[in-house]
Image: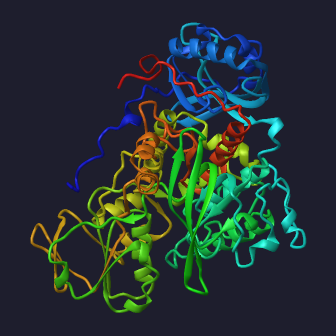
Amino acid sequence: MDSSRRYQKTALDSLPCLLPTRHIPDDIDPSSISRIFNDKLADLGENDFTHDALWRDMFSLSGTIRTFYAAKVILPTWQSLCQERKTTSFKLRPETAFINREGAGVAWLEVLFTFNMELPLQASCRGYLCLVPDGADEGKWKIWIMGTILDQVPEFGDIDRLDTVSSSTSDLHNNATSGTSKEETGSHQQTPQPHYDCVIVGVGQSGLCTAGRLQALGVSYICIDSNNEVGDSWRLRYDSSKIHTIRESSHLPFERTFTPDYPEWLSKDDLADAFKKWSERYGLTPNIWLSTTLESGSWDELTKIWTLKLRRRQVDANISDIITVTSSHVVLAIGINSQIPSYPEYANKSQFQGTVIHSKDYKNASKWKGKHGVVVGTANTGHDIAEDMVNHGLASVTIVQRSKTYVISQSAYQKHALTQYNSQTDMNTADIKSFAYPNALSRKLGLLANHIQYTAQPDLYSDLKRAGFLLEQDDDLTRHICERLGGHYMDIGASKKIADGLIKMKTGSLPVCYTDTGLLFADGSHLKADVLVFATGFVGNLRDIVRQMFGDKVADRAGDCWGVDDEGEIKGAFKPLGQPGLWYIGGGINHARFYSRFIAMQIKAALEGKSFPVFHGNEQDTRPKL
């Protein structure tokens, strides 16, 4: 890989979204302006939109996640779906109107609204409008961005509420219908029942959030995990691991999991312990089968039922049993990729006299004090491990950088994140602020914020460059999350160590082979190493796991998980797949908390025989031409 190359343009860069720069005076009244649209919402016309408007729907009218581009496409689609779903009770909330100023003259008026729909079942929905002045008609405002989001299905119960349970009544947790009880569990050795509405694979953040949401809706489920304890998905990571997002964005559903006395940047043990306590507090533990793996499964086209073979280990006895259960739905909450470590292949590995490990197996550098450490990879994990090596007193620490890396200032990220996630804003509202914009817009705003960030903190980035770090400046977090789910570095301290020379950089040439004492590079240079850690990610995506578990037919139907499609939407995750009864979920804690609500409501609707119809539309008409 050429270390000097720039990232190629992708779908997000090609999508038709231009930031508005028409002047909006400081003295206007956003509330009064927004009221103009109160009576229009139920009967919008093409002249109410800018010609390049965008509409993003999240499960309310489309039954999935779709982004529609241009007024001539949006209006007929909106009118048709409103009629089919029998939308009612549109209500603008002018008290929420405000002017959103993003810098560099970019600004718009934003206001929230609500509405209901009657089909396929009664549901309440939220929405927002981003309004801009009409350049051709002074005083007139038009819709530039519109968003609609499914909120609640009243007949299902409150997706955002689950009662806590005391230790004396944990077997009576509200809404649980799984048929298991605490008395049956022993050391999580539950007696299986023949059929569950849903089997969730994975008890990390995504699995727990989905389990809690399903329990709130009275859906029977079990949640299985190969680990021995809830929270192990974090607990077993390298010792210095911490979450790189702020505390207020890291809560689990139904509560603020982390009180202000927790650190702003939560450690792996903070998260692991909180996950376990949360599962106990909300009565999930009777439905959690630990030390259990999904060996294989099959889908019956006639009955629409999964048959699953589970292997359950008895840890103390070091034996395992195969148990067969059936379910109507399977949620894969085991991570977006395959979790199979990716190693670059270099020749003569057997000659190397030192230690070679993947970051998945790294714990800490204490046993290598005084040694020479080399880390291959420059995303979050690579930086964390290099910093840990410095802190443990290695004689030298070097990062091998194979391509440019996007670095995010922790303070800049924190400042922005706190405008969305803070103690005064409820979590669902904060999540909508974070996730509801079209990804094409988020990409453009991210690039703008990135430019402002580099301008505001020139010393940090110039110091990195002087230290030999290959910095990717023309990038943003949206692309890394939506297309790569990583590959960037959220700076929590390693950048200064690089700038100060405590962490050396090796760039400009790629390794070609191992030697007895390190790595030989294509330019003939040699890097001494006693320990090599590959922080180089994982291979494949979730579809590869589906293929192993369920076979080619199911995997081909299900399709890819992550990356973006031609509308800029993440592939596969959170929404109906081509394979009925199968769901993908993954990402950060905020992804898990927000999107689990939609998976749970979709599963509940399907179980009730009232699945949300998925609007596929005409691809040529509804998607931008790239």
Front residue of 598/543: it is 543
Q: Is residue 387 above or below residue 114?
A: below
Q: Position of residue 37 (x, y in %)?
A: 72, 16
Say if 368 sits above or below 47 in the image: below
* Residue 235 position within the rendered picture, expressed as x and y whole percent measured from the top left: 58, 75
Residue at the (41%, 31%) spot, across then down: 566
Image: 159 above or below 538: above
Residue at image location 72% in from the left, 16% down from the top: 41
- In this view of the protein, can residue 23 be seen by the observer? yes
Tell whether 34 sits left or right of 293.
right
Q: Who is closer to the viewer here, 198 or 477?
A: 198
Horizontally, residue 144 falls left or right of residue 404, namely: right
Quadrant for residue 603, please give it.
top right
Please identify the residue farthest to the front as the structure is shown: 302
Residue 308 point in image, percent of width and height: 56, 57
In the picture provided, is 64 more to the left or to the right than 42? left
From what the image shows, is residue 559 above or below residue 122? below
Residue farthest toward the right in the current orientation of the protein: 168
| Residue at left offset 46%, top offset 34% | 568
Q: Quadrant of the C terminus?
A: top left
